[in-house]
Amino acid sequence: MPADAALLAALREVQEPELRRSIVELGMVKGAALEGGVALVALALPLAPPDGGEGLRRQVAETLLRIEGVQRVEVDVRPMTDAELDSVGGVLKGVDPLRVVDASGAGGPPQPRRNPFTDSRTRVLAISSGKGGVGKSSITTNLAVALAQRGHEVAALDADVWGFSMPRMLGVDRSPGLIGDVIVPPAAHGVRLISMGFFAREDQAVVWRGPMLHKALEQFLTDVHWAEPDFLLVDMPPGTGDISLSMAQFLPGAEVVVVTTPQPAAQKVAQRAAAMARKVNLSVVGVIENMSWFRGDDGKAYEIFGSGGGEELAADLGVPLLGQVPLVPALREGGDEGEPIVVAHPDDEAAAAFRSIAEQLDVSLAPRRRHHPELRIT
Ligand SMILES: Nc1ncnc2c1ncn2[C@@H]1O[C@H](COP(=O)(O)OP(=O)(O)OP(=O)(O)O)[C@@H](O)[C@H]1O
Ligand SMILES: [Mg+2]
């Protein structure tokens, strides 16, 4: 099928929904012709979309119907061949096929993978704590969804390689896509996720040593097509060990949010996490207190784990207390079922707390994109 220049130009605007790149640029348009008012388009799909390609078909039709002379659109879709996938993988990695071949015609040295988060506009937020079980994963999940609900492109990295829990909490039920050797993160509730949970069995003990962790993290950052999100939230493993060092190296611009519970003992441990972050030159931008109270049927807030820990820690670190999240059974249930509370119970006070934290992270702590704060329109 010949390619009609006007059709191709219009199709350039259509993006592959998961890869967020133009379908023309990705080489997905295998033909586009106009015959007697009918636009015939042949597409090859790099990923098996959950809707069977229906959304893309519709988008192509809507785009082409805007062109004068097009009365009807017929879209034919087929999966890509392995060779086509390899070439898409090359496009995603930014490898120029003409450049890897040297003058003698032999293959040149492979181009090094680029860390997509150095010099990127993505804000990286690492959610950490000194000890386990304080709610890092629940907070990362709900905060990510809350940021997506505010209209941002959001991705999450479950860096808790031992106790990965984000796939379940976020309700991701698909494996990552594979295009050539590029990993495409599956998404749920508007958040793209990569987790060790996709690559290891849940009942399998993974024994990680420092260098392996480092390598895994590097791979998660460089072999994954992240498509430059506005935010990348990282669910850190508990503790202050090796992964903080690796993180600092791979994501030097990461901002750390420390999670603590209200009792003073927890706060001491959280302080160590903050100290570690600062030691590796990551900036701590705020504190979130979790399990702050439980509201009984009588409407009263019971401070089961004491009070003041979050505020004290924030004051010690000289950063804002971004919010207090109450203890609510629906939050745990949402985590178990893959329906985060900000989605399942948006009216709950815990959901409101997450939205407020997302807003603060979004507005008051967004120095990177605002080059001229004095020009802010109010
Ligand atoms: N505010 C809350 N209300 C009710 N349950 C909560 C709340 N925060 C966390 N939980 C529950 O507590 C448990 C531990 O939370 P979570 O897994 O988020 O913590 P974590 O800090 O990531 O733990 P780990 O260190 O093991 O990774 C989970 O079952 C979660 O559902
Ligand atoms: Mg966790």
Image (tube, rainbow, N blue to C red):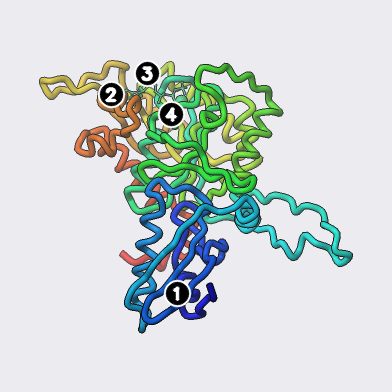
Mark yes or no: residue 144 visible.
yes
Q: Residues within 10 Å of mark 4 (few under 14, many from 20)?
A: many
Indicate the amino acid at tag 3.
Answer: Gln
- Marks 2 and 3, how far apart at CA: 14 Å
Distance of label 4 from label 2 (alpha carbons): 14 Å
> Does the beta carbon of the residue at mark 2 sit less than 8 Å from ligand 1?
yes
Residue nearest the viewer, comparing 257 with 44: 44
Dot 4 falls on a residue whose secondary structure is helix
Distance from the alpha carbon under mark 4 to that under mark 1: 44 Å
Rounded to the nearest angstrom, the CA distance separating label 3 from label 4 is 16 Å
The residue type indicated by label 4 comes to Lys
* Residue beneath the point at 34% across and 24% down: 336
Whether the residues at callouts 3 and 4 have beta carbons within 8 Å, the answer is no
Foreground: disc 1 or disc 2 = 1
Which residue matches tag 2? 327
* Circle 4 or circle 1, nearest the eye: 1
Labels 4 and 2 touching (C-beta < 8 A): no
Residue 118 visible within the image: no
